[in-house]
Amino acid sequence: MKIVLISDTHGKHDELILPDGDMILHAGDLSGKGSEKEIVSFLNWYSSLPHKHKIFIAGNHDFFMESGDPEAIKKMIPDNLVYLNDSGVEIGGINIWGSPIQPWFFDFAFNRQRGKEISKHWAMIPKDTDLLITHGPPFKIMDKTFQGLEVGCEDLSKTIENLSLKLHLFGHIHESYGQMELHGVKYINASIMDVHYQVHNDPIVLDW
């Protein structure tokens, strides 16, 4: 299965040139300011893509996805999309789990305090998860800001140690785009935007 990985498109999805694939995953920050209008624009675009399986989570810019009425949001999402919010799906034998939560970051959406508050979310991740999508990175893995600060989640890192994980997709820290492998897990920061919020990085493609 060929999987296309993207994140942090921030409302500029129409500027993207996407490769073909069987599945596409988006790791959040669908919008710039998080308005309902921006979210609808993203959903219309995403649902029109030719990829058979289209999965996404929200990110810290996507305010409407946290503050809006859950039932209304559910009705907004086209039938050919899978929205994960501390939830999972199995596709082609791949167990996928997604969460928009990240450590407290200014006054954005889906913020949680480090420690007990955020660990409650990570505790929900099933042990047999193959592919994890979070908006933010784990600690010390492609989490370094342009200021040199490592802002990833230590609590998430501890949880990952106990999973049978093969791939962890995230974004959030635009300037740390890239991929690496550690202890048998492939980590990918698929941020499309650079630190100046311009489309700069290519979608990442892998064969599962």
Image (cartoon, grey):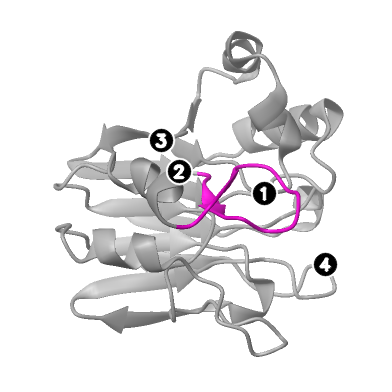
Q: Which residue is mark 1?
A: 60
Left or right: 150 in relation to 195: left
> In the rendered structure, which amino acid carries the disc numbered 1?
Asn
Give the residue drawn at x 70%, y 20%: 68
Mark 2 near mark 4, Cβ–Cβ under 8 Å?
Answer: no
Q: Report helix, strand or loop for mark 2.
A: strand
Q: Report helix, strand or loop for mark 3.
A: loop
Q: CA separation, marks 1 and 4?
A: 14 Å
Q: Residue 63, position in %: x, y? A: 74, 36
- Give, as a single range, the part of the protein colored magenta: 100-114
Q: CA separation, marks 2 and 1?
A: 11 Å
Q: Which residue is mark 4?
A: 197
> In the rendered structure, which amino acid carries the disc numbered 2?
Ser
Which SS does the magenta portion mostly show? loop
Circle on res. 86: 3
Left or right: 49 in relation to 101: right
Mark 1 near mark 3, Cβ–Cβ under 8 Å?
Answer: no
Q: Residue 84, position in %: x, y? A: 45, 34
Give the residue drawn at x 15%, y 60%: 162
Q: Which residue is mark 2?
A: 99
